[in-house]
Amino acid sequence: MCGRFVSTTTPADLVDLLGGLRWDPVETLAPSWNVAPTDPVPAVLERVDRETGELVRRLRPLRWGLVPSWSKDPSGGARMINARSETVHEKPAFRKAFASRRCVIPADGYFEWRPVPAADGHKAFKQPYFLSTGTVMLLAGLYEFWRDRSLPEDDPAGWLTTTTIITMDATDSAGRVHDRMPLTVAPEDLAGWLDPDTSDPDVLHRLLARPGGGDLRVRAVSTAVNSVRSDGPDLLAQVPDPLGLAD
């Protein structure tokens, strides 16, 4: 799974990488070295502008943890941070979004944990690892709209837009740390992935790729990242690896 990640890419960086992109400066998110479930995350998506009919590529914040439109309340979103690529086109919670509401979430890398058994007077603990490619990863995601039906439909406070990250079986270096890994979309495949008119599951699955071809850089980092209240670039500082999994 992908349960925490790092996101420090600026809108200007994304324009250099992806080309034309619109965003609301008021909605621009601050860099985060410890993005956690239910946090707002930056997402790139395409929607038809109601006034012009133009398909517009936008950067906007979405809440991490997908809430299906048919949910009675948004409380289950924290459990829907990931969608399995093997079944994403079939599961009721994801299939409509997979068909027409796809996005990418820029990330510097992500964290995974491995248990370290008690030894030499030390208690058992979970060792965090930071996995990255050394470049911006465009994590493949889906997004969905949920409306609080206790409020008027035209009340902005009644709408929630959420997202999830697509994962698959981990390979190579990522597989040493965890059995799942997030999938990415290459910049050259972004137009096809974001286009809401592209709905063929086989075509969409072919646009998904393992980050770095599955060969990621692995670094043991401080257990400070275990707390969702911790943040800052110091969380990525390398520490001795008790399990010998790091590069």
Image (cartoon, rainbow, N blue to C red):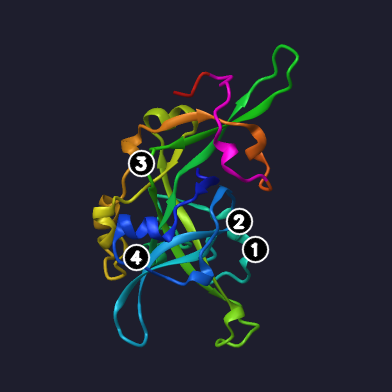
Q: Which residues are magenta?
A: 230-243
Which percent across, then down, holds residue 223? 65, 33
Inter-mark Cα distance, 4 to 3? 22 Å
Residue 118 in the image: x percent, y percent?
Answer: 70, 18
Q: Which residue: 49% across, 42% down?
A: 110
Instruction: Please tell me whether mark 1 sits on a helix, a strand or a loop.
Output: helix
Mark 1 → mark 2, Cα distance in angstroms:
7 Å
Q: Nearer the viewer, residue 180 or 221?
A: 221
- The disc placed on residue 46 is none
Question: Label 2 near label 1: C-beta < 8 Å?
Answer: yes
Name the image quarter holding residue 169. Answer: top left
Is the residue under label 3 in contact with that under label 4 (CB below 8 Å)? no
Q: Amino acid at mark 3?
A: Pro
Q: Position of residue 44 (x, y in %)?
A: 40, 62
Specify the principal SS of the magenta part.
Answer: loop
Question: Which residue does the numbered mark 2 point to in the structure image?
Answer: 78
Q: Please tell me which of labels 4 and 1 falls first in the chain.
A: 1
Q: Residues within 10 Å of mark 2 (few under 14, many from 20)?
A: some
Within-10-Å neighbours for mark 1: few <14, some 14–19, many 20+ = few
Circle on res. 99: 4
Residue that mark 3 sits on:
211
The residue lying toward the viewer, choosing from 110 and 203, is 110
Residue 32 visible to the viewer: yes
On the image, which quarter does residue 112 sit in? top right
